[in-house]
Image: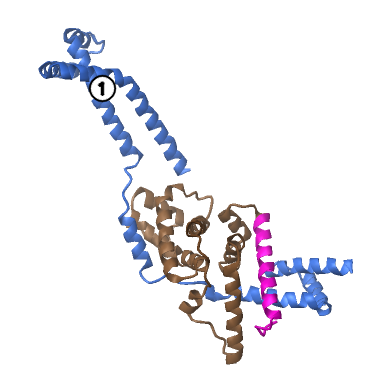
């Protein structure tokens, strides 16, 4: 009996293809939070995100033979995830909804140094930014989510969305500017105290 | 005025470098002295900082729901299993063998005496194999004779289609081999 925890992603994938489909549970265990987080940020609600993330793992499983160790497994599965969500939305033509669940699930991180008023303002700021991010078109939102929220590099994002590095950078820069302009507009309207 | 705009454009690029964590100490000083004098860039900087800090907060790492893994594995266990290229190739070979026996049947039916002669005349003598072929030939011949005209036309048709089918089988196996190799790559 092999100890799956000590094996690399690629070794587990070979095991899944050649011998033991149950070895895939180790892959699910390693990447479920990553995939779920990304899908949740793109879908906006936990129920859809749960179903969608499961479908993504099943899709990855049925295509395991196509995985190339040239890329990290995380890059490969995030590519499947983003494409899957985009396809779903194209079919559904639905609008995105604000991203709240992640914070609600984990509990809002409160600093003991902040007064309740400051925490409320901070919370409103965060919510506004998440709403604005949700409203961005996918071509800007996906690179920003992957870069700022998942900590991926430009190169990894370029591999995932299969666009040149320069395009990835431009989209992130443009996405940030769009967020900044929207926030500035809201701030000038006097709704939020942080500007 | 133009110089001021150029500065602001450069500072905006430096804001991006700052958000990427790629700003040098000299560039940092340049940003600081610029935003001390430029209200617009100062405001932009504050907004960019809010965005950067909000987006990079640890709360963005979410946990998948309870039972996620089990649910995925259960769905995977219900997927139809693929036979795989080796098994498929084996099926094709069995198919070829059946068709070939059909072709042989026609040969034996049309000229059983000649077929037996050819087996005897085979340059390498393998008595056990010869006996097996002879038995098959005699059995097929008597079977076809017992079946009458229907079996004759069936075996003739099989014999004519044999070459075409053989070619299709070879193509399918080759195609499958390359698809399998491509998938592995």
State the image coordinates of residue B111 (x, y, percent, origin top left): 19, 9
Q: Is residue A22 left or right of residue B3?
A: left
Residue drawn 63% across the image and 59% down it: A154
A167 inside magenta stretch: yes
State the image coordinates of residue A46 (x, y, percent, origin top left): 44, 71
State the image coordinates of residue A150 (x, y, percent, origin top left): 55, 67
Q: Which residue was labeled with disc 1?
A: B100
Q: Residues within 10 Å of mark 1 (few under 14, many from 20)?
A: some
- Classify mark 1: helix, strand or loop: helix
Residue drawn 46% across the image and 66% down it: A36
State the image coordinates of residue B42 (x, y, percent, origin top left): 77, 77
Residue A4: name its quadrant.
bottom left
**What number of labels is visible?**
1
Q: Is residue B12 left or right of residue A86?
A: right
B105 inside magenta stretch: no
**A25 or A89: nearer the viewer:** A89
Residue drawn 73% across the image and 70% down it: B15
Residue A121: name its quadrant.
bottom right
Residue drawn 62% across the image and 62% down it: A140
Quarter of the image with the N terminus of chain B in it? bottom right
The secondary structure that most of the magenta stretch takes on is: helix
**A44 or B114: nearer the viewer:** A44
Q: Please name the color used to draw chain A.
A: brown
Residue B56 showing in the rendered view: no
Q: Is residue B141 above or below residue A60?
A: above
Q: Is residue A87 left or right of residue A133?
A: left
Q: Please name the color used to draw chain B.
A: blue
Q: Is residue A145 above or below residue A1?
A: below
Q: Is residue B160 left or right of residue B33?
A: left
Residue B94 showing in the rendered view: yes
Residue range highlighted in magenta = A166-195
């Amino acid at each position: 009996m092999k100890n799956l925890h000590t094996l690399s992603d690629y070794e587990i994938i070979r095991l899944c293809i050649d011998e033991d489909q149950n070895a895939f549970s180790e892959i699910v265990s390693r990447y479920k939070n990553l995939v779920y987080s990304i899908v949740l940020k793109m879908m906006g609600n936990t129920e859809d995100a749960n179903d969608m993330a499961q479908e993504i793992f099943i899709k990855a499983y049925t295509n395991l033979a196509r995985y190339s160790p040239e890329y990290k497994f995380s890059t490969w599965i995030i590519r499947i995830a983003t494409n899957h969500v985009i396809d779903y939305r194209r079919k559904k033509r639905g609008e995105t909804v604000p991203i709240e669940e992640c914070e609600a699930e984990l509990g809002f991180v409160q600093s003991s140094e902040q007064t309740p008023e400051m925490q409320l303002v901070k919370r409103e700021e965060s919510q506004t930014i998440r709403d604005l991010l949700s409203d961005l078109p996918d071509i800007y939102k996906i690179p920003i989510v992957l870069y700022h929220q998942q900590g991926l590099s430009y190169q990894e994002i370029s591999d995932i969305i299969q666009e040149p590095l320069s395009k990835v950078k431009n989209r992130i820069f443009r996405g940030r500017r769009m967020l900044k302009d929207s926030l500035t507009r809201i701030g000038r309207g006097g709704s939020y105290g942080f500007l | 005025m133009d110089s001021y705009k150029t500065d602001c454009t450069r500072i905006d690029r430096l804001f991006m470098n700052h958000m990427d964590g790629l700003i040098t100490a000299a560039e940092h000083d340049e940003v600081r002295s610029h935003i001390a004098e430029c209200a617009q860039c100062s405001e932009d900087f504050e907004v960019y900082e809010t965005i950067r800090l909000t987006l990079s907060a640890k709360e963005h790492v979410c946990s998948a729901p309870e039972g996620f893994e089990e649910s995925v594995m259960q769905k995977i266990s219900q997927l139809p299993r693929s036979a795989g290229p080796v098994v498929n190739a084996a099926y094709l070979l069995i198919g070829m063998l059946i068709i070939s026996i059909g072709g042989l049947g026609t040969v034996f039916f049309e000229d059983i005496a000649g077929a037996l002669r050819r087996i005897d005349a085979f340059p390498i003598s393998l008595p056990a194999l010869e006996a097996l072929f002879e038995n098959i030939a005699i059995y097929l011949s008597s079977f076809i004779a017992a079946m009458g005209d229907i079996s004759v036309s069936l075996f003739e048709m099989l014999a004519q289609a044999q070459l075409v089918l053989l070619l299709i089988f070879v193509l399918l196996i080759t195609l499958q081999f390359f698809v399998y190799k491509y998938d592995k790559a």
